[in-house]
Amino acid sequence: MHKPHPTPQRLADICVVGAGYVGLTAAACFAALGHRVRCVENDQRRLSQMRRGETPIYEPGLDGLLREGMSTGRLTFTSEIDQAVPGAEVAFLCVGTPARPDGHPDLRQLAAAARQVATAATGDLVVAVKSTVPPGTCEALQLLSDDAASPDVRISVASNPEFLRESQAVSDFFHPDRVVVGADEEATGSCIATLYPSEWPMLRCDRRSSELIKYASNTFLALKISFANEIAGLCEHVGAEAVSVLAGVGMDQRIGPSFLAHGPGFGGSCLTKDVSGLVATADALGYDTPVARATLDVNAWARGRVVDKLATLLGSLAGKAIAVLGMAFKAGTDDVRDSPAVTIAERLLAEGAAVSTFDPVAEPEALRHLQHPDAYSAVSGADAVVIATAWPEFAQLDPARLASVMSGRVILDTVGVLDPAAAAASGLDVILPGRSAMDTFHPVMVRPLEWALDAVLV
Ligand code: UGA
């Protein structure tokens, strides 16, 4: 028996434009709360999949909710905005806002969706922007909507950013740390806020603040990861253990343990894009954001250092057989957008290595020819293995079997899933970033000695 879903403050007819991770999760979860949801998706292949009750993305728990919504009749799909909008009270815009090469967000899909929604509206409509956007976007969309809507229709654009994580999207929707509603008019804000259960933490504010909350939150999460990676690098130099150091840092309640795991750097469709968007927004206003810029620089370094470390361990990468395990940008998803694993595999190829890959669900289009059906087949004959994504099944790999099929001994476990002692017993050499090579021999560190003696000798 699953727990009943919470009850929203009122039930409404809503429309969700865009059935990606954010849109499809929102549509299925709003339907589970009891709303009548029409979800618009213009990709015909995805649309027919969803109409068959299949999710076009890998997201735990989502397929069950999708089928539940369809069986109750509360969740329907269409490719036609002008069929979905009339009769809806609120239209949620959940289309992509990818980064342009210069770091500015590309808002063209969003602008097109806003205009189509406004054109299709036959009565007053609240447009809630869930896509992540720079501050000022809702106001820009308001102007576009006012221009597109018929004169007797009033469109009110508001911000309602989404904070869910891929791979935990459904659980994040039902257990939010906060729901943020940014509206410049009380009635518009209330119209959106009351679609959610009253017991969920709610922050109401103006549109620009709401838009910036999302950018600033993702920037802070990215900053924590880059900080963890910087400290992990320092651990290697001073002979400390990053896992212990970061655990100790995170135990301070003012800091907190989450998003302090070091690894191959952050990836995915959001963090890099949103930090870049924040930097670009500030730049456009003549304001400098050095902390956000450094967050991106450290992340590029964290990715690069995986390959550099491998080159140091193997001498040269040219002609070496390297297996990369885990292609998704993180465990639990099939999403490979801005995946550190893909960057690592591409750089290994560029250095002349023969690369083989495996991921339990993800399959990057451009590297499909390197993909193997299972981990053992991918590592067969490998001089070294990189574990790039923390899929739980990698922790279950049998070290003896790995050792028997690999040519070399080195496993660079960037995400710390293997048990190094068990692997060592099978003759494997598991390298964990953030850990000094000086396991047994710790030479005196000259600088602290000098500084200490300075005090004695003065
Ligand atoms: C992120 C945010 O966590 C969500 O709150 C936000 O809603 C979402 O972006 C978005 O803007 O749509 P997501 O990209 O799904 O969610 O993934 P995260 O779980 O945040 O992971 C991002 C990256 O950081 C991954 O590559 C992950 O491996 C890495 N990471 C995460 C670390 O390297 N260390 C950590 O401690 C945590």
Image (spheres, rainbow, N blue to C red):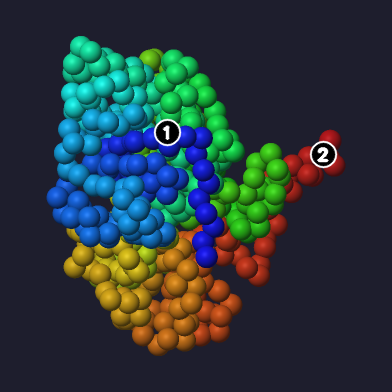
- Residue 133 in sight in this render: no
Kindly identify the residue that appears in the image at 61 percent across and 65 percent down: 438
- Residue 436 in sight in this render: yes
Amino acid type assigned to the residue bearing label 2 in the image: Ala
Viewer-closest of 17 and 284 = 17
Residue 145, x across and y down, in percent: 24, 19
Viewer-closest of 75 and 98 = 75
Residue 133, x across and y down, in percent: 35, 29
Residue 161 is marked as 1
Which type of secondary structure does the marked residue at label 2 adopt?
Answer: helix
Task: Note whether 279 is above or below 70 in the view shown.
Answer: above
Image quadrant of residue 285?
Answer: top left
Amino acid type assigned to the residue bearing label 1 in the image: Pro
Image quadrant of residue 109?
Answer: top left
Query: Mark 2 — residue?
Result: 455
Viewer-closest of 458 and 89 = 89
Q: Residues within 10 Å of mark 2 (few under 14, many from 20)?
A: few
User: Comparing marks 1 and 2, which lies closer to the viewer?
Assistant: 1
Mark 1 within 8 Å of ligand 1, using the beta carbon = yes
